[in-house]
Amino acid sequence: MGNVAVIDVRMLAAADGLGTNVRDEELTGLLARVAGGDLGALGPIYDACAAELFAIAHWRTGSAADAADCVQDVFVRLASSPSVIAGVRHARRYLITMAHRAAIDRLRARRPGVPLADEPFLEAPLFDPARALDASRAAEGLREVPAAQREAIYLHHFAELPFREIGRVTGVPTFTAASRYRLGMAKLRKLMGGAR
Amino acid sequence: MSWDGFRPLRPPVALRERVLTAAWDAAAQADAGVFSALYRDRLLRACAAVLSGLVVANVVALHEGAERAAPAPTVGIEDGVAVPVDWGLTMAEQLDALAPVLGTTIARSRG
């Protein structure tokens, strides 16, 4: 029975590409299993959420290597302090918040002046050269957008969170979250020559 | 601008193995208990030693303080006055016990 649940979650995650189709109740159940000492639930949680957590950390830190470390930090914390996650009610929000905080910690620990690897923030669909060019231009523009604004763009467009939820997971008022998104998009449009 | 078809960079495939291995290792270390952690970590041992020393010093200090705060017992009565035992306490520490001997109350601050 447990294996069936694992396969379901993996299929949902693979279908969407980001894992956002996995219902919060399923994730909460998986977290409860980890809280109960069942570390086998970490795999399905990874399959369901890792892409999203990786992207959040990538868009915040600007570095894919740091983002990978952030994902690792999140799962290490889940595994090493199961009692903390026993009472989590909104699993996806909780995991996104953990990824956000891990990214902030990485940014604070980063030595100034160290150049970042130039991984693109976006990938275009295969077999579409025109969209690939657009993705490349957008990724270049995103690199010029401040990290907090870039993160707000990701959370609103790709994670599909409303501004109130973005404010919750990033620890800022709703108005600030909306402002970050608006300013980031304005800057991105300007950098891309006003394309809409 | 349109985001249609774009998707964020995905994590490398090898990350799954790395993350889950690190998580299992962390869980194993968390389960090992405090004595195993003390055995492994020199800094933790030093902290535990310092903490133990502070606890012992605190217990000793409390014990001495209790002894010094105890009212001085009296021995014998001379001319109708109880004389405290000479335990080497200071005048200030014996004020209450000596008040009947001195026959006067000395004003002092208790702050």
Image (cartoon, rainbow, N blue to C red):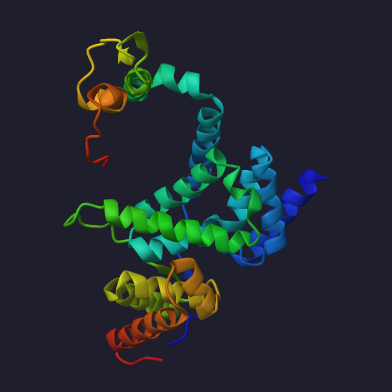
Q: Residue at x 25, y 10 (%)?
A: B86
Question: Vertical placement of B88 versus A194: above or below?
Answer: above
As drawn, the residue found furthest toward the top would be: B76
Q: Quadrant of residue A58?
A: bottom left
Q: Nearer the viewer, residue B55 or A39?
A: B55
Q: Can residue A111 be seen in this snapshot? A: yes
Residue sitting nearer the eye, A53 or B81? B81
Residue at the far right: name it. Answer: A1
Residue at image location 45% in from the left, 73% down from the top = A154
Q: Nearer the viewer, residue A55 or A110?
A: A110
Give x and y (percent) for residue B37: 45, 23
Q: Residue furthest front?
A: B79
Residue A137 in the image, given as x and y percentages of width and height? 33, 78
Q: Which quadrant of the figure contains the C terminus of chain A?
A: bottom left
Question: Is B37 placed above or below A162 here?
Answer: above
Q: Is residue B76 above or below residue B93?
A: above
Q: Residue at x 33, y 18 (%)?
A: B64
Give the side of residue A31 with respect to residue B55, left or right: right
Residue B81 against residue A48 in the figure, above or below: above
The N terminus of chain A - image quarter:
top right
Position in image of residue A123 (x %, y %): 45, 68
Query: In which image quadrant can residue A178 be found?
Result: bottom left
Looking at the picture, how far across and down is residue B30, in whole percent? Answer: 52, 31
